């Protein structure tokens, strides 16, 4: 470094300049204090004008969290729309078909709230979070109601299915074995007794030993030999329905046994007060005989009938 | 003012005033800026650490709360979704049990939108040209039709005849959801065998009003039926021209034999009398003594899309309700 000189007017000489510690300190102090003052000015201006950095960072984080929250809300919306579809099915489809009262919004929305959740104090001031929680709690409650409702529906549907299955609904004798069907129900002349009396069933004339099928699911309430009915089987179908099969040559069921529709319960015979082999068939609703003609499907084709019979008897034999 | 600093110049053997060099000044300047900025930065971060603003505090708290409850709600929602999945499977089971047919999942087709999004300008050009051609041909034919219609005279007799043709659904069914089972081979609900179902079943809650589908005269009713089989309470209305409609399994019959009824008038209410497994109205159209498919006779108040939808519903090979 080139040496610098200063002119000293007292000595009238150029004197070399020396860098003393004092001088250096003074220079440095000047330098930094100036720098500090400028920085402070800059700082004041910045603070007045812009948001602090920490806050900016928090704000950014907050924005991201709100976006996440929004997606949570969308998920909640999706769950609600699925649930509403199920509720619609429940109220307007199943409950109509199963003859139940629709639950309605009063039942579905009752009892939301209850004990105050622990987190409530924490989120009280945040409307967004509170609202979402409210919606979520409501969803949970409605899901609960809907689950219970579906369980109830499943139970009712099962009962109804059993009811439909047990109702007498087919002919007790196959069309191809049937020679004649006496559709006279009511008063008629009795061929053996020789006087007019009510005839409370239908007569299916068929060859001896023709299989007789149960017309609905049910339990054998009794099977015995009677002087008038001969070998007779009583089936209790539940739901106020009962069927009787009389004048059988033999029966192969016993009291208490569960019978499926289409299962062979006996064979056509000529026992009791009967003049020729035939089946006397009665249907009772609430212990009163009604015309069985209403209780078999007349437009069921032979093929369909045989399919039905075969299916059940095959099922039974495979069980043995 | 005299310069304060001098250099000794050995060539001229003289002291010459030192000139301020640019590089030196610039160096000092840079040094100064760096130090200023460093101090500024330090002050700023110190300030940030020491003095958190009210807003900053609130934000921090909110962020912590949001993070925490987002996580807890997310797990809760996952549980709820599991319940929903379970309910959906229960739903299809129940549907199968009741209607003896699988629940058709409606998958929304997004094909159209996607192809639209992927299309480039040339596609639009072609499509626009096609549309233009179509619209001009349609306007041409519609012009012809209008001319045709304006020249054709509909006789009063013919109009009267139309009034006697069944043309609406026997119950209010704007959403088309009530037609449960149609005409033809169906599963019998009692013995589960296939049989011929001679009408259309509209399921609705008990007491839903039943409407006449055309002008006519009540020719037969049955009320107070106790038999657990057959049509139960029913109404038959003769519309002339060999057309008779039958409404069966009613709860209430509100008309008497011989009464004249107008299209859309309430004649009874839905029930499940007779051989029915659910409250519904079994609707038959008898043309010249023979039952025919009633769905084609339900075109009124429906646009073509709804009509096709109704036909689809009516042709499902499921279980009937009687």
Image (tube, coloured by chain):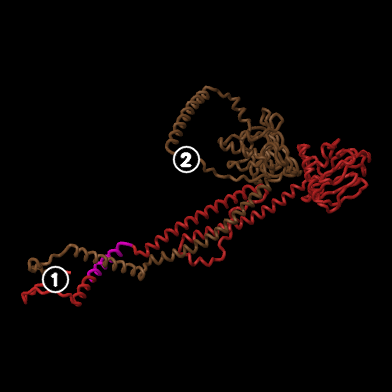
**Residue A17 visible to an observer of this rendering:** yes
Frontmost residue, B158 versus B193:
B193
> What hue represents chain A?
red
The residue under the point 30% across, 65% down is: A47
Which secondary structure class fits the magenta region best?
Answer: helix
Frontmost residue, B58 versus B279:
B58
Residue A178: percent from left, percent from top? 85, 37
Residue bearing the label numbered 2: B116
| Image depth: mark 2 or mark 1 in front | 1
The stretch in magenta equals: A33-50
> Which quarter of the image is occupied by the N terminus of chain B?
bottom left
Marks 2/1: CA–CA distance: 82 Å
> Which quarter of the image is occupied by the C terminus of chain B?
top right
Q: Quadrant of residue B61?
A: bottom left
Q: Is residue A186 left or right of residue B242?
A: right
Chain letter, colour brown in render: B
Residue B153: percent from left, percent from top? 55, 23
Residue B169: percent from left, percent from top? 62, 37
- Specify few, some or many for label 2: CA neighbours under 10 Å numbering under 14, 14-19, or 20 or more: few
Does the stretch in magenta take in A242? no
Up the image or down, A301 lies above or below B4; here it is above
Up the image or down, A54 lies above or below B182; here it is below
**Residue A199 visible to an observer of this rendering:** no
- Specify few, some or many for label 1: CA neighbours under 10 Å numbering under 14, 14-19, or 20 or more: some
Q: Quadrant of residue B173?
A: top right
Q: Which chain letter goes with mark 2?
A: B
Q: Quadrant of residue A108?
A: bottom right
Residue A116: percent from left, percent from top? 54, 66
Q: Which chain letter goes with mark 1?
A: A
**Secondary structure at numbered mark 2:** helix
Residue A4, numbered label: 1
């Amino acid at each position: 470094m080139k040496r610098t000189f200063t002119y000293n007017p007292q000595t009238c000489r150029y004197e070399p300049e020396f860098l003393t510690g004092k001088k250096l300190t003074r220079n440095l102090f000047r330098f930094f204090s100036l720098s500090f003052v400028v920085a402070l000015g800059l700082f004041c201006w910045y603070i007045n004008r812009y948001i602090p950095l920490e806050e900016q960072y928090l704000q950014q984080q907050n924005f991201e969290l709100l976006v996440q929250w929004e997606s949570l809300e969308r998920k909640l919306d999706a769950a609600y729309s699925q649930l509403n579809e199920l509720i619609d099915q429940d109220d307007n489809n199943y409950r109509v078909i199963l003859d139940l009262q629709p639950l309605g919004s009063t039942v579905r929305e009752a009892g939301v709230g209850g004990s105050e959740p622990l987190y409530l104090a924490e989120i009280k001031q945040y409307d967004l979070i509170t609202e979402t929680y409210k919606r979520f709690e409501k969803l949970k409650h409605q899901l609960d109601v809907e689950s219970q409702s579906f369980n109830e529906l499943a139970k009712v549907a099962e009962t109804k299915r059993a009811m439909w299955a047990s109702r007498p609904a087919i002919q007790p004798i196959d069309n191809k074995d049937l020679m004649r069907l006496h559709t006279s129900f009511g008063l008629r002349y009795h061929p053996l007794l020789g006087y007019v009396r009510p005839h409370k069933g239908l007569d299916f004339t068929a060859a001896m030993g023709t299989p007789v099928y149960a017309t609905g699911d049910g339990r054998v309430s009794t099977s015995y030999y009677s002087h008038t009915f001969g070998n007779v089987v009583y089936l209790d179908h539940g739901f106020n329905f009962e069927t009787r099969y009389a004048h059988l040559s033999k029966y192969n069921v016993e009291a208490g046994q569960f019978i499926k529709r289409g299962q062979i319960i006996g064979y056509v015979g000529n026992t009791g007060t009967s003049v020729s082999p035939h089946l006397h068939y009665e249907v009772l609703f609430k212990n009163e005989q009604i015309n069985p003609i209403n209780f078999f499907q007349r437009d069921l084709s032979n093929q369909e009938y045989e399919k039905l019979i075969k299916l059940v008897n095959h099922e039974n034999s495979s069980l043995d | 003012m005299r310069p304060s600093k001098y250099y000794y110049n050995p060539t001229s053997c003289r002291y010459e005033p030192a000139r301020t060099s640019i590089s030196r000044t610039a160096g000092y300047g840079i040094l100064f800026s760096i130090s200023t900025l460093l101090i500024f930065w330090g002050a700023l971060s110190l300030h940030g650490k020491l003095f958190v603003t009210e807003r900053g505090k609130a934000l921090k708290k909110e962020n912590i709360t949001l993070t925490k409850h987002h996580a807890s709600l997310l797990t809760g929602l996952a549980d709820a979704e599991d319940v929903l999945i379970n309910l959906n499977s229960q739903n299809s089971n129940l549907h199968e049990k009741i209607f003896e047919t699988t629940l058709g999942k409606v998958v929304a087709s997004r094909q159209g939108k996607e192809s639209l999004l992927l299309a480039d300008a040339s596609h639009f050009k072609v499509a626009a040209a096609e549309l233009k051609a179509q619209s001009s041909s349609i306007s041409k034919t519609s012009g012809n039709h209008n001319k045709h219609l304006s020249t054709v005279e509909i006789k009063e007799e013919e109009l009267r005849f139309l009034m006697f043709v069944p043309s609406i659904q026997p119950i209010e069914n704007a959403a088309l959801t009530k037609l449960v089972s149609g005409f033809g081979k169906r599963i019998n609900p009692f013995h589960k065998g296939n049989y011929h179902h001679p009408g259309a079943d509209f399921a609705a809650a008990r007491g839903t009003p039943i409407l006449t589908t055309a002008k006519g005269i009540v020719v037969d009713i049955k009320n107070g039926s106790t038999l657990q089989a057959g049509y139960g309470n029913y109404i038959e209305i003769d519309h002339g021209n060999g057309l008779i409609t039958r409404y069966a399994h009613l709860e209430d019959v509100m008309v008497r034999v011989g009464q004249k009824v107008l299209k859309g008038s309430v004649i009874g209410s839905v029930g499940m009398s007779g051989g029915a497994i659910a409250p519904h109205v079994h609707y038959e159209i008898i043309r010249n003594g023979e039952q025919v498919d009633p769905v084609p006779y339900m075109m009124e108040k429906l646009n073509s899309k709804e009509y096709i939808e109704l036909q689809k519903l009516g042709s499902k090979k499921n279980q009937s309700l009687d």
